[in-house]
Image: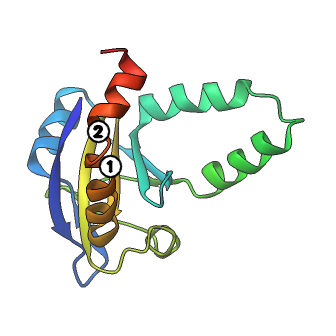
Amino acid sequence: MFYGEYKHSIDRKGRLILPAKFREAYKEYGVERFLLTRGLDQCIFMFGEEEWRAQEQKFKSASFTKQETRSFNRMFFSGAVDVVPDKQGRFIVPPYLKEYAGIKRDTVIIGVSNRIEIWDRKKWDEFYSNSSKTFEQTAENLLNL
């Protein structure tokens, strides 16, 4: 549903705009609100409501008696916030999520199929640089190509 890489900046009012391609996709699939939360690798995850519920079911089925499960769920769900983009596709990223991701102003918004990730631009560039070096080997290991 969400694909591509887009550079945007947070405006003076703390708003971020979704790329036009993502706005088209969420309208096509009837997504009206999103949930933001702490993602992995110091980015922010952004899910449509339906996908959020699917992820929530997976996490709820994990045993809460395990320390790792409790810790992950606390970080993931305590960071969650609903956002409804305005008509221009703008929404506010809460300060605690910007702090978590190290975002000051410049971002990269990427589509990762069923979710959107919001990265600090410098952190994305670093991640991309490091990951692109091993992309083919990772594909071979994961996909048995």
In this rendering, position of residue 58 left or right of residue 95: right
Residue 131's disc is 1
Residue found at the far right of this picture: 65
Q: Residues within 10 Å of mark 2 (few under 14, many from 20)?
A: few
- Please report the residue visible at 34 percent of the width from the left and 23 percent of the height from the top: 140
Q: Position of residue 110 (x, y in %)?
A: 25, 48
The answer to whether 97 appears left or right of 79 in the picture is left
Residue beneath disc 2: 135
Residue shown at the point (82%, 29%) measured from the top left: 63
Q: Residue furthest bottom?
A: 12
Q: Nearer the viewer, residue 34 or 72?
A: 72
**Residue 84, percent from left and from top:** 34, 52
Q: Are marks 1 and 2 in contact (CB under 8 Å)?
A: yes
In the rendered view, would you say 113 is above or below 43? above
Image check: 45 left or right of 64?
left
**Mark 1 belongs to which amino acid?**
Ser
Residue 114 appears at what percent x and percent y?
34, 31
Residue kind at label 2, given as amino acid type: Phe
Q: Quadrant of the N terminus?
A: top left
Secondary structure state at the residue bearing disc 1: helix
Say which residue appears at 43% left-offset and 49% top-offset.
Answer: 45
Distance in Å between CA atoms under marks 1 and 2: 6 Å
User: As rendered, which of 32 and 17 lies closer to the eye?
Assistant: 17
Label 1: few (<14), some or many (≥20) within 10 Å?
few
